Image (tube, rainbow, N blue to C red):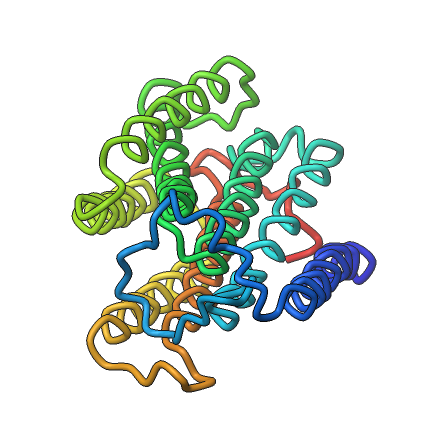
Amino acid sequence: MNTIFWYRKLIPAFICLIFFGLFLILNNWFYKSGFWLQFNDWSPAYSFVCEYQNMNSVMRQPLNTLSNIIYLFFGIEIVIFSIHDRIFYKNSPNMVRMNYQYSLVFGLCLIYLFLGSSLYHASMLDFFSQFDMIGVYACILFPLIVIIHKIIAATYFGNKPYFSYWGSLIAIIIFIFSLFIFAGFFWQSEAYIFIPLMALILTALSVYHVYYYVSAYRKDFLIYSLVLILGASGCYIIDMYYCYELSYFQLHSIWHILAALSLYYYYLYLRSEKNLIAKTSSGDDPAE
């Protein structure tokens, strides 16, 4: 148990330290170089983000850039979960554990959000703001696709836990196609409507699935996820209207941290579900 826990945590921590050091080295190396000024054709982003923008720096918003590293940490940890599940949990009474490719894709979504949001806050260019929004859409859309797949499996396949390359492949293809549509055409002001709407649908479907088709789950994980995303949303909204741009305490950075934690706990909640037909939990994860 301790071995599994520590390699889940130490590998992401080591990689995050490398990126953190790389960010600081680049920021020092290109300090006041006006690095991003050569890309003015991409146009500065119109942003409500509070933190002061040092237009001559390679990290124009250092706090909001560095706080994205938490997405990288959890993304790598979830990828490690997928490798672990591929080896040990082929017969788990849980669709996410049994279909390890779901953990892999969700982990990659978080890693992509780290890259997109870091580039956006470092450059504050409109070109990278769409990259950031693709990551946000991915991290809310993929869990929604997974929960829909779980409900379909419960409704039409007797709620039997199963491994299905075809089922998961179709779900992932639908996810990529939907992501292209939403992030390609609804990534500006429309995103402030679609993303909260998707979050509400995800919450409603999760409650429906738990009530009718789940025998046991970690209620604390689900509560943590909901509380954290509410707190994160509050920080995001307040930051748009009330801020001190030179402060070392930036609410948008707190939004990154709380949102990442909320996504992580929602993932752990999905892993904790056991179908109603499961009498025993032979697939219990010793790391949890």
Query: In this orientation, which residue lies closer to the viewer: 84 or 251?
Result: 251
Height in image: 8 above or below 109? below
Question: Relative to residue 18, is residue 193 drawn left or right?
Answer: left
Count up the numbered dots: 0
Residue 139, given in percent of the width and then of the height, sits at 42, 45
Height in image: 141 above or below 163? below
Q: Residue furthest right?
A: 3
Query: In this orientation, which residue lies closer to the viewer: 56 or 105?
Result: 56
Q: Residue furthest top?
A: 166
Quarter that holds the N terminus: bottom right
Question: Relative to residue 216, is residue 280 drawn left or right?
Answer: right
Height in image: 238 above or below 133? below
Residue at 77 percent across and 54 percent down: it is 4
Residue at 40 percent across and 61 percent down: it is 225
Quarter that holds the C terminus: bottom right
Residue at 22 percent across and 51 percent down: it is 196
Query: In this orientation, which residue lies closer to the viewer: 260 or 35?
Result: 35
Height in image: 181 above or below 275? above
Residue 33, given in percent of the width and then of the height, sits at 58, 64
Residue 53, given in percent of the width and then of the height, sits at 41, 70
Residue 255, given in percent of the width and then of the height, sits at 39, 68
Question: Relative to residue 200, is residue 174 drawn left or right?
Answer: right
